Image: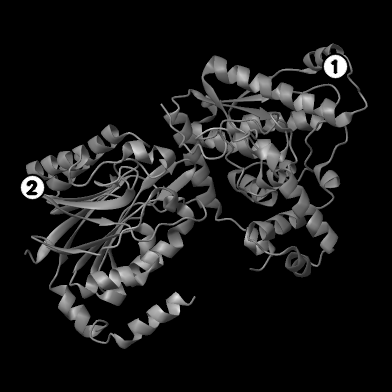
Amino acid sequence: MLLTKEALKLDLPLTATRLKRFIKDYVRKTKAKGAVLNISGGIDSAAAVAIASLALGGSKVLALSLPEKETCNSTDIKHTKMLAEKFRFNLETINITNVLEAYYKSIPDFNPKDALSKGNIKARVRMIFLYYHANRQNRIVVGSSDKSETMMGYFTKWGDIAADISPLMDLYKTQVRQLATHIGVPAEIVKKPSTPQLWPGQLAEQELGVKYETLDLVLLGLENFIAPEEISEQLDLPIKLVTSIKTRWLSKEHKRRAPLTMKMEYRTIGTDFRLPYTLP
Amino acid sequence: MSNEITIALGQISCKVGDKKHNMETMNKIINQAKQRKADLVAFPELSLTGYVVRDRAYELAEPVPNGPSVRQIEEIAKKENVHVIFGMIEKSAKASAVLHNTAVLIGPKGYIGKYQKMYLPTHSVFEEKRYFRPGYQIPVFETEIGKLGMFICYDVYFPEVARMLSLKGANLIVCISASPSVRRGFFETLTAARAMENTVFLAFINLAGIEDGLQFWGGSRIIAPSGNVISQAKYDEDDLITARINYSDLVRVQAWVPTLRDLRPEIFSSLREEAESL
């Protein structure tokens, strides 16, 4: 298998059709009234809210913009409004700064310098707002996690990953960009550098240590059982970089699965209790 | 035996684990197909239960032919005067935890026979060997609507199944399937190949809809012995197609591409030897 940009090329009309059908089908089967998503102004949430709006109609989609004072910026606000106008979904903005500060004050040994632990509170608080609206309004939570970040464990456990369905989770970041462009997400959002917005100035590619164009090809190679040595040779990358990506991918499995339990009985949740999604 | 028959393919999506719902769907489709003068109505693999039933397979299984669902389809087939093929989880009459992935053939006079899937995919998203015992028989049924053979989905990758059916005289092979979208290209090629290499009519009936994030791609089709697609259903969505086939066409194609005449049986024993030492 050749690890080239071509290998990540999608049949875009087919991909869009299938994702729309998937969202619509799930909403219908769960008898939900619509979807609720977090919108940040970034590429993943823009693609997710756009495809959900195209699937269900914007009137059935509620996008929650949940800014907080440390990472809030005018560009993201502008992009969020631009998307709402284009895809005609309902946009609600709730400033979560007060909630976050209440958490910071309530945790006895809270350390403001521990940016990761603090940032994870932000992602988890956003999840609480999403599920509150889902419960109150009989909506499903549509996640916007992509395959690159999910494989790398580059998300907050029980935070931004939390959702009822994640339509984009089998698409690498560069594929989400292709899809977003195809369905009409404005180019300035597609081209904007990705950030989880857990602290000011945080940039995904900087933290991951590699550009998404490269990362996606390495991950595609690993997905296809290609040995790190061959990936390194094909992409002309240091073997150390490829093995570090592989190690990170494997070591984050705990973030992607239901909590591990000790096998004690006949059938065990998460291992050999194998049930289908049974919808009402 | 009629020389000309009308085949209907009921490309349905199933409600997973809900036999009552799926039976009602099949009943409705049989009724619609009969209005289009169908002699045979075929449904996808595991159409009685849905495909992704996982551990629920044990509670959903029934004996064949002495189970309630076969009896129910027998009544429908009798009332509508039609042949029906559908897919279900079969529970062994001898051991209740021994299951098969089975295609059942029922005629206007009742149960005719069954085929138990021989090749059980257990890779990628598939986990069939975890639940099913493979079948060991490749029967052909002489019916009023032709000499029928059946196989199921992944069996299409193993040309010996269709070859055995054609060697036993089948002139119509029905492949019931639950093939997810990532496999579409393979199936479109392989189903045509199985028809051509055996010079038989082949009806491929696939599931539609989404189960556990798997989009079943539909695209059911009736393929002529020449490999030409006579009729094709929509991709991904529920559909019902019918086509009229005439068995007289077989002579013309078999004379033009005489694959059965040109078979080399002496290769088969060395095939076995090579396969055993793989």
A216 lies left or right of A206: left
Amino acid type, label 1: Tyr
Local SS, label 2: loop
Amino acid type, label 2: Asn
Quarter of the image containing the N terminus of chain B? bottom left
Crowdedness of circle 2 by 10 Å Cα count: few (<14), some, many (20+)? some
| Numbered mark located on residue A104 in the image | 1
What is the basis of the colouring in this image? one colour
- Residue nearest the viewer, comparing A46 with B69: B69
Crowdedness of circle 1 by 10 Å Cα count: few (<14), some, many (20+)? some
Q: Quadrant of residue B138?
A: bottom left
| Numbered mark located on residue A134 in the image | none
Does B248 appear above or below A261? below
Q: Residue at x 35, y 51 (%)?
A: B234
Q: Pinpoint residue A242: horizontal percent, then vertical percent.
A: 79, 59
Q: Pinpoint residue B7: horizontal percent, then vertical percent.
A: 19, 56
Respond whether the residues carrying marks 1 and 2 are from the same subunit: no
Local SS, label 1: helix
| Numbered mark located on residue B81 in the image | 2
Q: Chain of mark 1?
A: A
